[in-house]
Image (cartoon, rainbow, N blue to C red):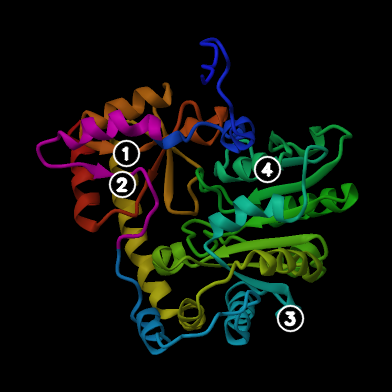
Amino acid sequence: MTSTPHASAPPTTPGWAARRVSRALPDFPWDHLIPFAERARMHPDGIVDLSVGTPVDPTPQVAQAALRDAADSPGYPMTVGRVDTRQACIDWLARRFGVTGLQLDAVLPTVGSKELIASMPAHLGLGERDLVVYPALAYPTYEVGAKLAGARTLATDALTAVGPERVAMVWINSPSNPTGKVLPVDHLRKVVAWCRERGALLVSDECYLECAWETEPVSVLHPDVCDGDHTGIVAVHSLSKRSNLAGYRAAFAVGDPAVVGELLAVRKNLGLMMPGPVQAAMAATLDDDVHVTEQHARYEARRTALKDALTAAGFRIDHSEASLYLWATRGESCWDTVSWLADRGVLVAPGEFYGPAGAEHVRIAFTATDERVREGARRLRQS
């Protein structure tokens, strides 16, 4: 006769389930926006979705042509990337932003910047003894990547207030997502000096560097910031925003060759590599400035239309001198503002998604089509 387990016996739990890394992660913020999106979609003239910064304009022909020409790609690409792709990254930084002194071993192509940001702490061996510092208002993936590695986190803009504990990594983001704030050269120099004094790796997320409206952003790799010494510094760049290549997942890390080399060694073992045709498209797109100027003009017109309409509706716009967003407030809870706009069929992101300091702001993207931006501006002016 077979025995039957006692009814109160606990079920067997697989070891991985007891240690699920997802338990260490914050709630996925966008899930909280679903009911507001549903309400906005009920508007008789449709939703005006300004909540995310995803490009809607065509991918440049130069990228499409390069992708087609490289479509016959039967072999495995190399993790380190093609020479012409890495050289295009170096040439672009020199031509557009005055960054000098880079060699091929300072560049590593990656499958989008989010994957790189999320995986970097773990790939560099950070753990529970390490502290990762990021801005008080920040892209959530800085925190996610640190927590996946088991590291501790601190959100602050005041590095001088950080205690004596071991700081392994400092993230900065200029131009900022969500605020559009640009850090001046003097501030960047102080951050570089602080990180070098503390032995912390400085990683600068510069994905919006070419999306500037009222000032000129500077790369942390510029000689005016780091005196031409890239030791202990890595910058992250993406073609998603500047070139409408979000669907291509084209990005790269650049900076200290020792850090880039460590990332390369880990990523080779994991088989992380950018597809060859995408590398070809990335090189061709970085070499072309014409499409960037054209896209910049589109965004500038949309930005102006929304900014004027928001101001007329009683909003105050803070920072927003660069990036693809307007950081707006009515001096109330961000969720009240989200609700007010949703009633008018306009969906935006609550500032709280990016940290408690954003509790009274909303982030408004101007990456929607010209028609949707005009419609959103019309509704705001009628309010």
The residues bearing labels 4 and 2 have C-alpha atoms spaced at a distance of: 35 Å
At label 2, counting other C-alpha atoms closer than 10 Å, the crowd grade (few under 14, some 14-19, many 20 or more) is many
Viewer can see residue 124: yes
The residues bearing labels 1 and 4 have C-alpha atoms spaced at a distance of: 36 Å
Task: State yes or no: discs 2 and 3 in contact (Cβ < 8 Å).
Answer: no
Task: State yes or no: discs 3 and 4 in contact (Cβ < 8 Å).
Answer: no
Relative horizontal placement of residue 377, taking residue 27 as reference (left or right): left
User: Which of the image's four quarters has the C terminus?
Assistant: top left
The residue positioned 61% from the left and 68% from the top of the image is 271
Which of 363/147 is in front? 147
The residues bearing labels 3 and 4 have C-alpha atoms spaced at a distance of: 29 Å
Residues in magenta, as a range: 31-56
Residue 106, quarter of the rendered image? bottom right
Viewer can see residue 362: no
Q: Secondary structure at mark 1?
A: helix
Task: Name the residue tied to disc 1.
Answer: 310
Q: Secondary structure at mark 3?
A: loop
Q: Which mark is residue 146?
A: 4
The residue positioned 79% from the left and 63% from the top of the image is 226
Q: Secondary structure at mark 2?
A: helix
Query: Which callout, 1 or 4, points at the residue further toward the start of the chain?
Result: 4
Q: Where does the image place residue 258, in percent across and percent down from the top left? A: 81, 68
The residues bearing labels 3 and 1 have C-alpha atoms spaced at a distance of: 45 Å
Q: Which mark is residue 306?
A: 2
Query: Which callout, 4 or 2, points at the residue further toward the start of the chain?
Result: 4
